[in-house]
Amino acid sequence: MKMTTTTMMLGVACLICALVTLGSAISPRFDERGYNLLADTHTARSEFNSWARLNGRSYASQEFGFRYNVWRDNAAYIEHFNANANASFTLAINEMGDMTLDEVARIYTGLASAPAASLLAPAVEVDAETEERVARQQPSSYDWRNSGAVTAIKNQGSCGACYTFSSNAAIEGMYKISTGQLTQLSEQMLLDCAQGTGNLGCNGGNMEVTFSWIINNGGGVNKLATYPWTGTRSTCRYSASNNGAVIKAYRRATSGSESGLMTLASKGPVSVGINASPRSFAYYSSGTLIDSSCTSAGINHAVTVIGWGTDASGHPYWLIKNSWGTSWGQAGYAQIGRNSNMCGIASMASQPCFNADCS
């Protein structure tokens, strides 16, 4: 049957409409600046003062106005964003509510690119064919918390050592899976000791550099109870007698491959890099983060993948553990969109092993 010009035009129009609808569903950052600063009212000042007290904020008189205005801008943006019926997730004011995005990135992130391979311990590479095969064999959802392989949420504070928390979360989980023992490990030890070759204390570092340092220096990480977090780099006090886990190697997934990430995640928690720059990440609260502006460019933060699944709306996701305390996200956790390398989550995935060949 021949199509008339009118029928063809209607078909094209329907297609465009469908694409627009799909685009809004996967790109919830609609009309980025389409909101007004929260009005300076008695209610707004009261809410800000309550928030400041709750989060231990105290300002000099000359700083109060600036922080109040930043908080009002963030609050207005969050209210505007949450009014978007197409968004797959929600935002909320958290302990970073009075900070600009530049401040959040400078203070709370700190992931550096890995140096040349010659400067790292040899990684066990997972080949693409194996990644695809193993990924197809996995269940539709899994949460390593249900296996007792995830320790409590930690808080890095104002030290940009996210890489130490991501590294340890992966080691803690893999050690539990291997031995049956879940032991909290010391990020402070890694901050003090696992430095050089790109690791710069609170000024940033990399998980592969951290794994390499551990492997090249006896393989041990001290227990948190013997080496507590202070958030300031100091003299290395590592003691093998206080080890909570010992690793022998680490493996790396193909960069950008979510099949590769799935292959590692099927074995246990995985250290990954992520783009934490967008407001959608900084103030994430619930749902599955799907944001077209959260690309793989500008990866600057380290978190840990601890599972995967699909939400009630049919959005597949990766489950991550962050190191920003329990006031962020879903009590410290988040769901990041899966199958599109959302926020670059599959671009830098690695995992510690307890055998030299990662068998």
Image: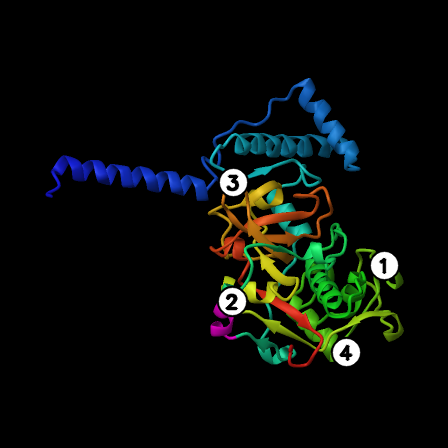
Query: What residue is shown at x 76% (from left), y 30% (from top)?
Result: 61
Q: Is residue 249 left or right of residue 289?
A: right
Residue at 59 percent of width and 48 percent of height? 335
Dominant secondary structure (helix, strand or loop) of the stretch shown in magenta: helix
Where does residue 232 sit, x and y in percent of width and height? 80, 58
Q: How is the image coloured?
A: rainbow
Q: Earlier in the sequence, mark 3 or mark 1?
A: 3
Q: Is residue 188 above or below residue 79?
A: below
Please tell me whether mark 3 sits on a helix, a strand or a loop: loop
Q: Which residues are magenta?
A: 127-134
What kind of residue is marked 1?
Pro
Circles 4, 1 touching at the beta carbon (< 8 Å): no
Q: CA distance from mark 2 to mark 4?
A: 27 Å
Could you say which quadrant of the image residue 303 lies in? bottom right
Residue beneath the point at 53% across and 34% down:
81
Secondary structure at numbered mark 2? loop
User: CA–CA distance between discs 4 and 3?
Assistant: 45 Å
Q: Please say if the residues under marks 2 and 1 sit with CB atoms less than 8 Å apart.
A: no
- Who comes first in sequence, dot 2 or dot 1? 1
Residue 321 among magenta residues: no
Q: Up-down: is 301 above or below 223?
A: above
Mark closer to the observer (3, 1): 3
| Residue 115 in the figure: left or right of residue 157 | left
Q: Which mark is residue 217?
A: 4
Q: Earlier in the sequence, mark 4 or mark 3?
A: 3
Task: Compute the Cα span from label 3 to label 2.
Answer: 26 Å
